Image (cartoon, rainbow, N blue to C red):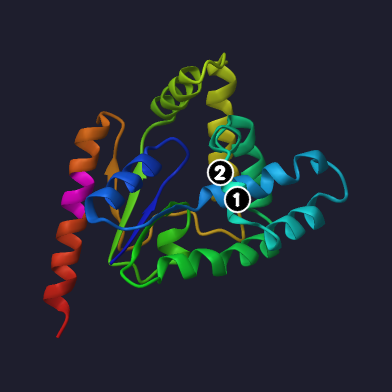
Amino acid sequence: MIIAVDGPAASGKGTLAAGLARHYRLPHLDTGLLYRAVGLAVAGHVDTPQFEAAAIAAARALDATQLKDIDALTAAETGVLASKVAVIGPVRQALFDYQRAFATQPGGAVLDGRDTGTRIAPDADAKLFIQADSKARMERRARQLEARGLVVDRYALYHQIEERDARDMANPNGGFYRAADAHLLDTTLLDIEAALRAAIAIVDRAVASKARQTP
């Protein structure tokens, strides 16, 4: 069973995807970490003529060990870097095969990101598109960062989220939109337990519906 979970930054998609993976006992991949790792690797080349070439090289050489420093990878600044490298076509192509292989492994998997249901796993058994308003997403991300002892400028963080949404949606190489067969889940007013229950119910219905349609 393949489950694709998409949505904007801090919508709760990563937490929900991890919860779905535990519930259905499936491996989980946060595809955004791949782009964050590439962005982090080329942080020193931002606004230089070498940026694009460096990002492509970093994507092609990406190693799973680069996904272990979660604090650095999930920093707000790294998210901005990720959205900058994600608009580079060869970077996306370099990371596509890794993601596709993960999705199609025996037994299935849960993947979350921005184009898992549209580009990486269009054949997923269940697709969810998670959304929440920008203010709620800013506050969630701020609390995550503060829990690590960091000082957060909420005004700046809000605008980072808005700018990243705009960049992701305008990405000519991306697929950041709700797939036609994706189920919408708005988490603005839901705590994580309620959101996870709703997500599990959506997946169960989607899988049951697909089973009925199979000859």
Mark 2 crowdedness (10 Å alpha carbons): few <14, some 14-19, many ≥20: few
- The residue carrying mark 2 is 68
**What separation in Å lies between label 1 and label 2 (alpha carbons)?**
6 Å
In the rendered structure, the answer to whether residue 78 lies left or right of residue 193 reads right
In the rendered structure, the answer to whether residue 87 lies left or right of residue 127 reads right
Report x, y in % for residue 172. Answer: 62, 59
71 shown above or below 184: above
Q: What amino acid type should be assigned to the residue bearing mark 1? A: Thr
127 shown above or below 46: below
Q: Residue at x 31, y 31 (%)?
A: 188
- The residue carrying mark 1 is 65
- Where residue 193 is drawn, which disc sits there? none
Mark 1 crowdedness (10 Å alpha carbons): few <14, some 14-19, many ≥20: few
Residue 41 visible within the image: yes
Report x, y in % for residue 176. Answer: 49, 54
Quarter of the C terminus within the rendering: bottom left
In the rendered structure, the answer to whether residue 12 lies left or right of residue 141 reads left
Q: Which residues are the magenta region?
A: 198-202
